[in-house]
Amino acid sequence: MRLAVPDLISNSYFPAIAVCELGFAEAQGLSLSHELIFPVTRTMEALRDGEIDFVAGSAHSTLTAFPNWKGAKVVVALAQGMYWMLVLRADLDVQRGDVSAVKGLRIGAAPGVDLGLRGLLLEAGIDPERDNVEIGPVPGATEQGVSFGVTAAKALEAGKLDGFWANGMGAEVAVRNGIGKVVLDVRRGDGPKAAWSYTFPALVTTDALIERDPEAVASAVRAIVNTQRALKDDPGLATTVGERLFPAQEAGLIAGLIERDLPFYDPAVSPEVFNAMNQFAAGIGLPAKQCPYGQVVATQFSDLWLNS
């Protein structure tokens, strides 16, 4: 079976990548490989079109290919909370948590991912059009096999952007290289409180696969949960994966990023989180009908979130 991620050199979807690389899928009798398909909107289209079996991506982005959640389900959370960060140029006189600092700036964000930033800004009373916030693609991010976050850091260094909205890896590279500083990290309390529940990294599959092969989906859920637990026990396992897949700098950073993210490694998808996410998605213009929780979240696997 095939699993796709919209960003590979990243901490965002790492449990799904580690599932394959560390043998946890194989231990469940599941033959699973991972691949990069960027951006997340295209990843979800590939799932819809039957090109892949699973997506590890932002949960709200499912709606870009499955309007009103019809045909797809979230089966397990890879982690909790909206996980992107706002990084601005290091030379700007900006304080941590100052959302208004984006006014008049060029901010890079991937399609689908940008919706989280737009929603956050509106929640904070900032209208991108009125306040001259230019939110657009990151130069070079569409090239085959690149990492969005790392490419965003390079674009910031080259002066092509004033900031970017991306994963923790891109943020860490920008900070370590002295070219950027983290202004907003929603998971850790920056920005409007409501933004925490806009989305979360999730494993998504189709209703058709659940109906056709529920045991394969159950095996994938067990493998994710077991991977999360293994990383909690030994974050250093992440380095093993990073050394296989990442450039040297990013391979050296991944274990520290995973250790920092461990408090969010909870596989459960609660009704409260789902409802808040759906409300955000509808408010930002995605086709998100108020569906019952059990219609969108594959609750038949919920026991596995705790008992794998």
Image (tube, rainbow, N blue to C red):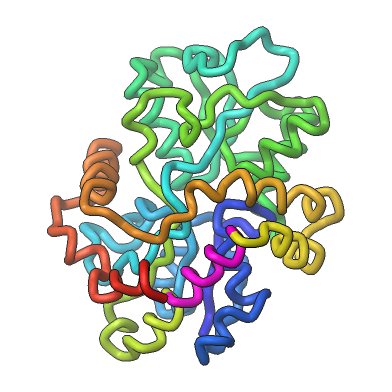
Image side of residue 198 versus residue 3, left or right: left
Q: Position of residue 112 (x, y in %)?
A: 44, 47
Task: Give whichever of 266, 51 is nearer the camera.
Answer: 266
- Which residue is found at the position 57% from the left and 17% from the top? 96
Q: Is residue 162 visible?
A: no
* Residue 303 figure quarter: bottom left
- Which residue is found at the position 62% from the left and 52% from the top? 11
Q: Is 163 situated above or below 244?
A: above
Q: Is 178 situated above or below 167?
A: above
Is residue 227 within the magenta segment? Answer: yes
Q: Position of residue 31 (x, y in %)?
A: 56, 88
Q: Is residue 56 visible?
A: yes
- Which residue is found at the position 49% from the left and 56% from the top? 40
In the rendered image, which quarter contains the C terminus? bottom left
Task: Give whichever of 198, 235 is nearer the camera.
Answer: 235
Q: Position of residue 75 (x, y in %)?
A: 35, 68
Q: Which stretch did the figure color magenta? A: 222-232
- Which residue is found at the position 53% from the left and 31% from the top? 185
Task: Give whichever of 194, 63 is nearer the camera.
Answer: 194
